[in-house]
Image: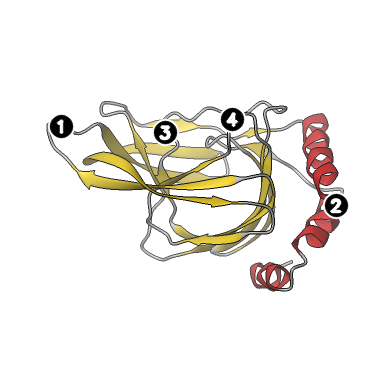
């Protein structure tokens, strides 16, 4: 189903039914995302995409080489299927000698992410913390630094929709003196993918 079709599903209050139908597809794959969740990519059409995101300590997850604080090159619509999501905004300010982080650009491709340090150094502090639960839908504009946090030991799954915004970049805060590097996306094997599907399905039925 297209991006606009899934937006219609959310508006109609049919997210759970739609997710269960999607999870029955035999061709599902999954990857470990560096931001700590498992991603099941569903649709990609130009600058628009639809995925299911799963946070669970029962599945191994990838570690970030920068930090959890990032911003997207696309506008996000996120619908919480179950669990609690905290959207923690970061207030980022340019800084010189007292900088604590460097801004890194993340360019994603079929083989993973190319992560490159920029000349921008910053400090940050925690801003607005939004808390969302099952059935909630929230949005986040491209270019806003934030982190997505699930309470420790918690389980959560979301439908994530992205719509690319021309001229925007994927960025992450990282160490001041880190270098350019490449991070490969780690696919889940068929058994792990099946376990992720069972886990989400069990929470929705």
What residue is shown at x 66% (from left), y 51% (from top)? 158
First in sequence: mark 4 or mark 1? 1
Mark 4 surroundings within 10 Å by alpha-carbon count, few (fewer than 14), some (14 through 19), many (20 or more): few
Residue identifier under label 4: 152
Distance between the alpha carbons at the discs numbered 3 and 1: 19 Å
Mark 2 surroundings within 10 Å by alpha-carbon count, few (fewer than 14), some (14 through 19), many (20 or more): few
* Residue 3, placed above or below residue 97: below
First in sequence: mark 1 or mark 2? 2
Q: Are marks 4 and 3 in contact (CB under 8 Å)?
A: no
First in sequence: mark 3 or mark 1? 3
Residue identifier under label 3: 67
Depth check: 128 or 146 in front? Answer: 128
Depth check: 87 or 168 in front? Answer: 87
SS class of the residue under badge 4?
loop
Q: Are marks 3 and 1 in contact (CB under 8 Å)?
A: no
Residue identifier under label 1: 98
Snapshot quadrant of residue 94: top left
Depth check: 38 or 151 in front? Answer: 151
Residue 57: percent from left, percent from top: 67, 28
Q: Are marks 2 and 3 in contact (CB under 8 Å)?
A: no
For residue 85, side relative to residue 140 (left or right): right
Residue 25: assigned label:
2
Distance between the alpha carbons at the discs numbered 2 and 4: 30 Å
Distance between the alpha carbons at the discs numbered 2 and 3: 33 Å
């Amino acid at each position: 189903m297209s991006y606009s079709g899934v937006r219609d599903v959310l508006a109609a209050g049919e997210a759970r039914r739609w997710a269960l139908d999607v999870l029955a597809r035999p061709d599902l794959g999954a990857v470990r995302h560096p931001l700590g969740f498992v991603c099941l990519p569903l649709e990609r059409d130009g600058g628009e995409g639809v995925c299911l995101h799963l946070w669970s300590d029962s599945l191994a997850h990838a570690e970030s080489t920068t930090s959890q604080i990032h911003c997207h090159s696309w506008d996000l619509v996120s619908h919480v299927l179950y669990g609690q999501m905290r959207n923690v905004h970061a207030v980022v300010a340019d800084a010189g000698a007292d900088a604590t982080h460097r801004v890194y650009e993340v360019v994603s491709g079929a083989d993973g992410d190319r992560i490159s340090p920029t000349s921008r150094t910053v400090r940050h502090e925690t801003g607005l913390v939004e808390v969302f639960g099952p059935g909630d839908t929230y949005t986040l504009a491209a270019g806003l630094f934030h982190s997505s946090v699930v309470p420790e030991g918690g389980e959560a799954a979301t439908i994530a929709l992205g719509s690319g915004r021309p001229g925007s970049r994927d960025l992450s805060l990282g160490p001041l003196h880190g270098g350019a590097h490449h991070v490969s996306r780690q696919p889940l094997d068929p058994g792990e993918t099946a376990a992720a599907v069972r886990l989400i399905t069990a929470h929705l039925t």
